[in-house]
Image (tube, grey):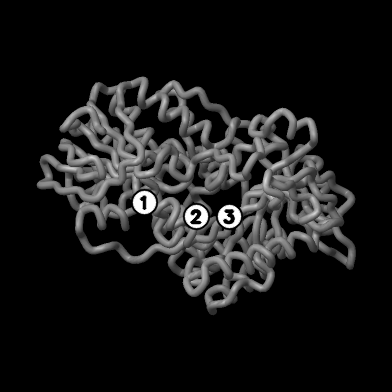
Amino acid sequence: MPERTSYDAVIVGGGHNGLVAAAYLARAGRSVLVLERLDHTGGAAVSTRAFAGVDARLSRYSYLVSLLPPKIVQDLGLRFAVRKRTVSSYTPAVRDGRPTGLLVGGGEARTRTAFAELTGSDREFTAWQRFYGSTQRLAERVFPTLTGPLPSRAALRATVDDDALWHALFERPLGELVEETFTDDLIRGVVLTDALIGTFAGAHDPSLRQNRCFLYHVIGGGTGDWDVPIGGMGALTDALADAARRAGAEIVTDCAVTGIATDGRSAEVTCDQGTVGARRVLVNAAPRELARLLGEAPPPPAEGAQLKVNMLLTRLPRLRDTGVDPREAFSGTFHIAEGYRQLEDAYQQAASGGLPVSPPSEIYCHSLTDPSILGADLVRQGYQTLTLFGLHAPARLFTADNDATRDRLLAATLAELDTHLAEPLAGCLAHDADGRPCIEARSPLDLDRELGLPGGNIFHRDLAFPYAESADDAAEGTAPARWGVATTHRNVLLCGAGAVRGGGVSGIPGHNAAMAVLEEG
């Protein structure tokens, strides 16, 4: 039961963004209550012993960190760290009938050689350097704006200070830039994948949803690096919950919120344990859930488009490409069926209502960079984790029979991986205490049921460009509008991934909602 009948702020949802908001507000002296329907905090950013009797703590849903600002870690005194991956990516290929691949990492000279051996010249590597040099300059300029009030579109364009890059990434479909910059199909595909994580779109989608996804994937930390959370993703949310409690926030789990009533000045939040009053309500849930709690019309449906698979192996599989060590290939992002044409074919097949014939996906091995998620015995025996994220698997494909469709897609995805292995992956899978293979898969509908992600959309809805749509909101709007966390009710704020500048494990919407509350006093 909550300890009080009224609070300065009630936060609906104990995921990482809600915990960030709670910690900031409690540190500022506000009375704060966090209500979480599950029996634990963390939302999608948790570590779980997924396999019976096996001492392995996997980042079950979200799994890498890029967008979390060091400012939040420092402000809240979090005992949390990330570790760089030594290899950025490996993409297997077949050229002239022989297995080969592209390893990006290990230093500039080694990467340059890998590009030349794959493509026959230095052209693509030179284009790669120029392209990612531009995105790094973009990251250095845009990322710091994410924890301040929303800039206007004109102000952000001035901050970027590169009209050609602005036009290419903010106004034209990303496919045009990719095709103008690169000629090799495989390299085009590797670049495009950052635009398709959890996003169902083609390279030339006129909505530019692929551009927005790409933007957030290349600006994190001012570098675009995607890092491994030491101890697993749950280490972050455990640290956030500890920080919130230390600051005086109250966290109640196993307590589902069933309704919010507000007159714009004060609010009442009804949950399984009763009703509590609040000056402000911060909702760390999708806009769909916010509308349900307020009794309002729902927003347009959102749709996720991914297959998430967790695995534990007794050892890494051998590769058909004998020129690369599996420990390097799997330590970065291992791209499967993600050539440019393959990605477009998979998109068109899924858009037509069928599963992709060659499902695109990407894998990485957390335990190569951070073995602390495994028990000491597993480490000694050489066990490794694999995390797979499948693309172009929209929720609509699973509605008729979720379980059967998930199983078919999983089998097809692993079969596609096997084409690049010297041995079947199944022979490397560990088994749990009941003798079952250590592999679990989640479809978009599973994520909707388990986490409340609408249609399994990991961003809660389509991502937005990180500027105010209205110049008035940026300059003269209410504090929630200026910070990108406004709803139709002034004292109800959105602090989850569905806020402007939401999505990913960032804490940014939680920080920004807290700043909006503190700005208004």
Mark seen at residue 498: 1
Secondary structure of the residue carrying tag 2 is: helix
Marks 3 and 2, how far apart at CA: 18 Å
Residue type beneath disc 3: Lys
Horizontally, residue 512 falls left or right of residue 78, namely: left
**Image quadrant assignment for residue 479:** top left
Q: Nearer the viewer, residue 143 or 370?
A: 370
Q: Is residue 424 visible?
A: yes
Residue holding disc 3: 308
**Closer to the camera: disc 3 or disc 2?**
3
Residue beneath the point at 25% across and 47% down: 486
Q: Is residue 73 above or below residue 412?
A: above
Mark seen at residue 213: 2
Which badge, 3 or 2, is on the more N-terminal residue?
Answer: 2
Residue beneath the point at 58% across and 47% down: 134
- Crowd around label 1: few <14 · some 14–19 · many ≥20 (10 Å): many
Q: Which residue in the rendered view is the most extreme toward the front?
A: 434
Q: Nearer the viewer, residue 262 or 332?
A: 262
